[in-house]
Amino acid sequence: MHSQDLLAADTGMGAVTLRVADLDAMTAYYRDGVRLTVLAQEGGRVVLGRPAAGTAGATGGGPLTVPVLVLEHEPSLRNAGPGQAGLFHTAVLFDTRADLAAALYSVATTYLRSFTGSADHLVSNAFYFTDPEGNGVELYWDRDRTQWSWTHGSIDMDTVYIDPNAFLQEHLTADALEDAASRPGRVGHVHLSVGDVAAAEAFYVDTLGFETTAAMGGQALFVSAGGYHHHMAMNTWNSRGAGRRQLALGLGLVRIEVPADDDLGALTARMRDAGVQAADDGRTVAFEDPWANRIEVTTAGRG
């Protein structure tokens, strides 16, 4: 691919929106378990995240924040049926293993039954949960990029069991636990359930502009910008052959943040050339993938 067909190297992920049936219960899980902070709440919409590292913004108007999740109350909706496309998990990235250990300890002690597994992926340490409405959650920490290995252009990843109790004993600190709600965290990647990996590659790589970093035959695809191990992933483990989603609880919106307006303009042109219907208001480009997962791309800081 030509460089003009790729997302900028500094591309990252923004807050994920979930449609939820029980706003109070879901807010409590992410606030009291995952230890995200309620950044805003109005009507049936709650924004959760973490105060950013540092203090006030450039104008001195208050602390910078990093939204991670937006919960939208949709009590009239129902869960999607089995085998449907949608969210596999939202992955929250922590800066240090101590920060990850504090979040792990918090959610495991307040919502122990939501824990579903753990893994050393060689590039990262990850712990997995399912929230009260069945949405997947990953909490993880990255090894330094100098420790990642690549083979013939593909990132080397594996799934090696991590004993969560041993991880806590080694990495949990009193300072991190006390400050868990203020430690910086952000959406590191988003993993989707899709109906077909080849179609996912055609959309997310050939059109949207990510690069493939790893593939598991026709089962899973990992893609990124700028050489990250993955900003997004798509798999068919539970959803092979799934068609377009119907309106349901669960994933409402995936946000991608590009560094500059020129990057947004280049993306808009690629979408147009590929025949993808996209709404462009000059600040945000919005469109759907082949399974009706809604994607919004904006410049960093506008999301």
Image: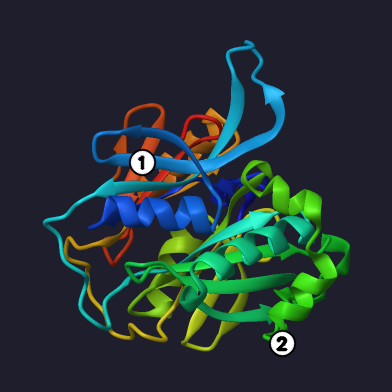
Q: Quadrant of residue 236?
A: bottom left
Q: Residues within 10 Å of mark 2 (few under 14, many from 20)?
A: few
Relative vertical location of residue 263 with respect to residue 30 in this rendering, above or below: above
Q: Position of residue 145 (x, y in %)?
A: 82, 61
Three-letter residue code for mark 1: Val
Q: Which residue is mark 1?
A: 46
Outermost residue toward the left? 76
Q: Quadrant of residue 96?
A: bottom right
The residue lying at 15 percent from left, 60 percent from top is 77
Q: Nearer the viewer, mark 1 or mark 2?
A: 1
Q: Residues within 10 Å of mark 1 (few under 14, many from 20)?
A: many
Tell whether 204 sits left or right of 182: left
The residue lying at 49 percent from left, 47 percent from top is 256
In front: 19, or 296? Answer: 19
- Whole-angstrom CA distance, mark 1 to mark 2, is 35 Å
Label 1 SS: strand
Label 2 SS: loop
Relative vertical location of residue 212 with respect to residue 217 in this rendering, above or below: above
The answer to whether residue 76 of the structure is visible from this angle is: yes
Q: Which residue is mark 2?
A: 160
In front: 41, or 155? Answer: 41
Outermost residue toward the right? 146
Relative vertical location of residue 19 with respect to residue 194 in this rendering, above or below: above
The answer to whether residue 208 of the structure is visible from this angle is: no
Q: Earlier in the sequence, mark 1 or mark 2?
A: 1
Tell whether 285 sits left or right of 211: left
In front: 82, or 220? Answer: 82
Three-letter residue code for mark 2: Val
Tell whether 218 sits left or right of 145: left
Q: Position of residue 51 (x, y in %)?
A: 61, 36
